[in-house]
Image (cartoon, rainbow, N blue to C red):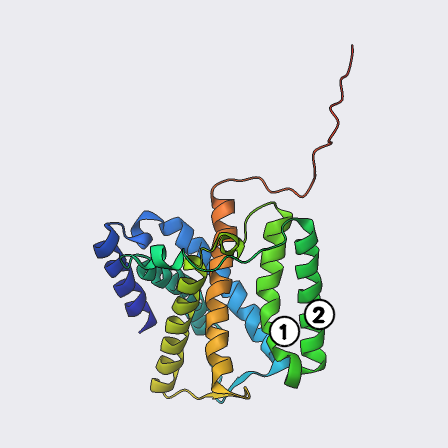
Amino acid sequence: MLISYLLLINKLVKISTGNGPLASQLKYYLSLGAASVVLCWLLVYLNLYTASWATEQDGSGILFSILFALLAPAVLITRALLGSVHGLLKFLARGPALPGISGETLAFALLAAAALGLLGGAAWPAYLFWLTWLSPLLLLAALQLLWHESTVFAAVNSGDWGRLICAALAGLIVGNLVNYTYQVANGSLISKLPHPLFTQAGFALFGLLCLQLGDVIAEHWRGKTRTTQRKFPIPVVVKK
């Protein structure tokens, strides 16, 4: 069902924009799928400490890896479809601007928050589990800042909320679809979260995480050299 959904959304994007993402950027989405597998298995590992969900039936690791490989591409192509809705991005670009802190100061603050989330979530999962799920996004955002690249939150400084909202909505759509498909296929997904809204918030957060992961891969795909070194501020003249 997820494969059919992915192909359908890709077709709708092609009809709407004249450009099919899978056809025009196939190698990028293959790389994104491989990264999605690693990301989802990381989330499965983190769930060993937080126990936010549980399954009664064990499945093949290969089958789960195939499913995981589809998730991030499905989220980003769904976001592309939402972004192609006439006037939506223009409307969302007129949101309230939030002042932000840029540079290494914010990067180290995000790294500290991510470390706190990983440690605190493992120590007190009943209360700080939500910090654990924030940690991967905070780590990726911190790396982007250390590489002198923009994060998914950069545009909100100018009031442009289009990318964030569309990515969160895409995460909600894909997450609920996978959850529903799993239940229809006689699976048992038992939520251990204190309120159903936490599940929806988790799906939205996964959409933002996929968007940030896609940005990291896109920067590498463009061949951009990443470095955290600063140039020496004083020119040095060497005389022969």
Q: Earlier in the sequence, mark 2 or mark 1?
A: 2
Residue 92 drawn above or below residue 197: above
- Under tag 1, what secondary structure? helix
**Image-based side of 130 in relation to 208, left or right:** right
Residue 206, position as x, y percentages in the image: 49, 69
Taking depth in this image into account, of 154 and 205 the one nearest to the observer is 154
Label 2: state its secondary structure. Answer: helix
**Marks 2 & 1, CB-CB < 8 Å contact:** yes
Q: Amino acid at mark 1?
A: Leu
Which residue is found at the position 32% from the left and 54% from the top? 22
Q: Quadrant of the N terminus?
A: bottom left
Locate the C terminus by quadrant: top right
Which residue reaches farthest right? 239
Please give the name of the residue rendered at 78% of the width and 12% of the height, measured from the top-left corner: 239
Amino acid at the residue labelled 2: Leu
From where the camera sits, is residue 60 visible? no
Residue 49 x %, y %: 64, 80
Res 187 visible: yes
Q: For this view, does 17 lie left or right of residue 152? A: left
> Which one is nearer the viewer's eye here, 83 or 23?
83
Residue 55's disc is: none
Placement of 129 over or under 235, stated as above or below: below
> Vertical placement of 70 versus 182: above or below?
above
On the image, which quarter does residue 116 sit in?
Answer: bottom right
* Left or right, residue 118 beside residue 27: right
- Which percent across, then down, holds residue 162? 41, 58
- Name the residue carrying label 1: 131
In this rendering, position of residue 15 left or right of residue 26: left
Residue at 32% x, 65% y is 6
- To which quarter of the image does residue 133 belong? bottom right
Q: Which residue is mark 2?
A: 116
